[in-house]
Image: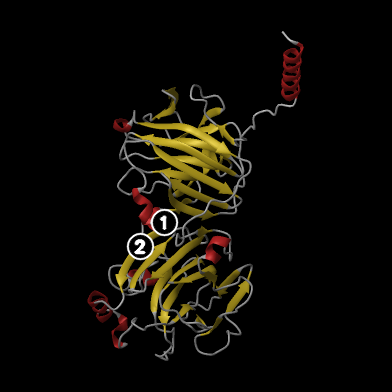
Amino acid sequence: MNSLRKTALLATGALTLLLSSFQLRPVRVVDDWQNLFDGKTLTGWKRLGGTAEYQVENGAIVGTSVAGSGNTFLVTDKEYGDFDLELDVKIDDPAGNSGVQTRSHFDAAAQPGKVYGRQVEIDPSARSWSGGVYDEARRQWLYPLDLHPQAKTAFKVGQYNHLQIECLGNELKTWVNGVPVAYVVDPIDPQGFIGLQVHAVTDAAQAGHKVYFKNIRIKTKNLTPSPFPADIYVVNFVPNYLNAYEKQHGWQLLFDGKTSQGWRSAKSPTFPAAGWQIADGMITVLPSEGKEAANGGDIVTKAEYQAFDLSFEFKLTPGANSGVKYFVTLAEKTDGSAIGLEYQVLDDALHPDAKLGRDGDRTLASLYDLKTADKPARFVHPIGEWNVGRVVVYPNNHVEHYLNGAKVLEYERGSPAFRELVAQSKYHVWPNFGEAPAGHLLLQDHGNRVSFRSIKLKQL
């Protein structure tokens, strides 16, 4: 080898050695997702609440129903606060039921021996409320899919479905197969365990049905809120508060929780000097022996509205009567309560009005004296607890009443059927009753103590 070639080889080798000493390591992509299930064992999980069986089959956790068992949950050993959770779920019983617990707990004094907390529903039945939110062993339904019926078709029976759950601060959002479903703002339970439900079975013939969970993973770092499309109703349990999404999409508070701003007497331009109390985040009509409009009288919004989505919380005392009226024009100049379409607020068990009218059309959440609310008992919260009422008036005059998320009636304002109802009611004496193009909203003074809060509206 000549000296020139030898020198070149030595130089090349030295350069290679020098470069290798400075070689950069491959860039490591940080993945913040963690598997909650290893695909082989139930390590990190424990069973609570019932006797249903859980085992691993073909890379999935399989829960099998057992006759005589209450609701059973396989829950994480760890508790979680803020997180994104993803998993795939399949259920073999088209009439069955299951769910995924979030930030949940076990064996409190009020729920001895029970798992309780917010559950994301798995519902293959004809009701189709998968992705809705239920408060297990506590408040029951928080977000039934009556509030978002377009999402009912997202879940597919007989196959794996991808479920996404986002819990950030007070906010819970759900998706089924990529479809946005439910949005709940709830100030309780900042952390808790995650659980997989096998529903209770009382009939031996229902035993042996299976629900499958796989690809369960969670992310607890570097979290950012995921966008939701416009016009999805938010169930918001923080009193007198709108979150950023609600503000962005046109919601406004009609009661600020502190003052009478935006409200006045139905009979004068000022707010009543007596008969109404604003305290502790509530606006309350004070009792006056059940006499209609005999104390402070009704109050109305200063503004008038045409088409809108109105939501409000109300709390009754035993035997109480009140109402939320809409399309109130004040043109009738009545001695008692002002005239308008009324969402009835009533203690059905104790107030005699519940037995008057026709076919129960004066009961809670009914269109007073016109159309009866069809409300399952589980959607009526006890006297002394808060209920959520909702009235939606669409630009085409289709109207809906809701109670605690359940749609309880609907009608077409101004239709022949509506006018026939009016003709049979106490309102037949008022020409074109309920058909004004716009009107005030009204909180009724019927002489009983009733409180309101979280009164919010979106114009449509």
User: Residue 284's spot in the image, x, y percent?
Assistant: 56, 73
Quadrant for residue 356, please give it.
Answer: bottom left
Q: Which quadrant of the rendered structure holds the N terminus?
A: top right
Going 61% across and 74% down the picture, which residue do you hit?
278
> In the image shown, does 243 or 31 lie closer to the viewer?
31
Can you tell which mark lies on residue 304? none
Quadrant for residue 435, please give it.
Answer: bottom left
> In the image shown, does 168 or 316 lie closer to the viewer?
168
**Judging from the image, what secondary structure is the residue with disc 1 in?**
helix
As drawn, 141 above or below 322: above
Q: CA distance from mark 1 to mark 2?
A: 10 Å
Q: Which residue lies under the disc numbered 2?
A: 408
- Residues at circles 1 and 2 in contact by the CB criterion of under 8 Å: yes
Badge nearest the viewer, 1 or 2: 2
Q: Which quadrant of the rendered structure holds the C terminus?
A: bottom left
Q: Amino acid at mark 2?
A: Val
Going 57% across and 73% down the picture, which residue do you hit?
255
Q: Which residue lies under the disc numbered 1?
A: 379
> Reading the chain from its start, which is encountered first: label 1 or label 2?
1
Q: Residues within 10 Å of mark 2 (few under 14, many from 20)?
A: many
Q: Residues within 10 Å of mark 1 (few under 14, many from 20)?
A: some
As drawn, 458 above or below 14: below
User: Residue 396's spot in the image, x, y percent?
Assistant: 33, 73
Q: Is residue 338 visible?
A: yes
User: Residue 132's spot in the image, x, y percent?
Assistant: 43, 49
Report the number of numbered marks.
2
**Judging from the image, what secondary structure is the residue with disc 2 in?**
strand
User: Residue 297's spot in the image, x, y percent?
Assistant: 51, 83
How has the structure been colored for display?
secondary structure
> In the image shown, does 66 or 164 lie closer to the viewer?
164
Q: Amino acid at mark 1?
A: Phe
Going 62% across and 47% down the picture, which residue do you hit?
190
